[in-house]
Image (cartoon, grey):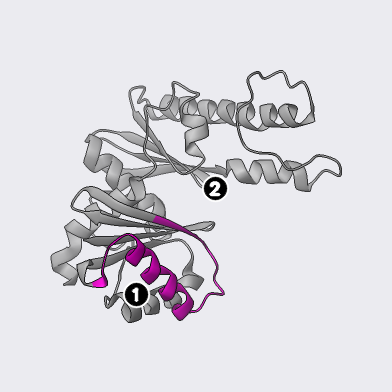
Amino acid sequence: MLLAVDVGNTNISMGIMEDEKIRASFRLITRTERTSDELGVIVYDLLERAGIGTEDIEAVVISSVVPKLMYTLTSCMKKYIGKTPIVITPQMDCGIVLKADNPKAVGADRIVDCAYAYHTFQRSCIVVDFGTATTFDYVSSAGEFRYTVIAPGLGISANALTSQTAKLPEIEIKKPASVLGSNTITGMQAGVVYGYIGAVEYILKRMKEELHDPDCYVVATGGLGRVIASETDEIDAYDPDIAYKGIRIIYELNRRKVS
């Protein structure tokens, strides 16, 4: 089994992959102050609760956008899982060609997402990842990662509204029944969610127009993506587990080179 680790700015997501099947998954808050022992005990306990022993783990592969956490996480995996993790970088065989202006600056999270999309659909794709930031990444029908759009995430947008105003309260991010808010809470929810849906639709339409690729396939991921994906026809599919699947694909492409 493969332990796929996706380290984001908000959460650390871990998936146990048995071939293409996700056997179990866990989510931790990203905290750079944790020691390798603290993190190791948590990971070991989560695996044990899922009925998975460390001896069942064939390899650990990490996709990370939080450099400060990498030493701790690497040490944790060596000490508690008994595996030196493979860390995804732009220099690896990722199944796609990075054609951005600065390929070395492309985040591992976006690499694994696009690797999954191109490998799975074998056509031009836009991957929309609703994370701390929302990213729109384009991979061409030739498997070339070329263009990206990066926007404030849905959570950031909601937090900005409450943190910059004296009387507006924190709200649950969900779509109200109508865009016509009848009170402060539903009015805020309408502005945040319906406004975000509109922004996503406009960006996708504009990207397809400038790419001259109207039939480009759009796949969404990320925890808050579920809120938006079901509300627009511009998104063709939603899959919360793209990162794990992309990590597995890149591992299979590189396992002999790193073993």
Vertical position of residue 92 compared to residue 249: above or below = below
Horizontally, is 176 left or right of 226 in the view?
Answer: right
Quadrant that contains the N terminus: bottom left
At numbered mark 2, what does the secondary structure look like: helix, strand or loop?
A: strand
Q: Residue at x 46, y 30 (%)?
A: 229
Q: Secondary structure at mark 1?
A: helix
User: Is residue 253 among the parts visible in the rendering?
Assistant: yes
User: Which residue is at a point 76% across and 43% down the rendered structure image?
Assistant: 162
Which quadrant is the C terminus positioned in? bottom left
Residue 2 x, y percent position in the rendering: 24, 61
- The image quadrant of residue 16 is bottom left
Q: Residues within 10 Å of mark 1 (few under 14, many from 20)?
A: many
Give the mark nearest the N terminus, 2 or 1: 1
Q: Is residue 106 visible?
A: no
Q: Position of residue 57 (x, y in %)?
A: 23, 67
The one of 137 and 192 positioned closer to us in this rendering:
192
The stretch of residues the image draws in magenta is 26-54
Q: Is residue 52 above or below residue 19?
A: below
Q: Mark 2, mark 1: which one is toward the viewer? A: 1
* Residue toward you, 135 or 99: 135
> Does the magenta-highlighted stretch encompass residue 188?
no
Q: Is residue 122 left or right of residue 10?
A: left
Kind of residue at badge 2:
Ala
Q: Splitting the image into 4 quarters, where does residue 114 fall?
A: top left
Horizontally, residue 88 falls left or right of residue 201, namely left
The residue type indicated by label 1 comes to Met
Which label belongs to residue 198?
none
Circle number at residue 133:
2
Residue topped by disc 1:
77
**Picture residue at 36% right of the left edge, 38% below the top:** 239
Kindly indicate the quadrant of the structure image that contains residue 255. Answer: bottom left
Residue at image location 47% in from the left, 69% down from the top:
67
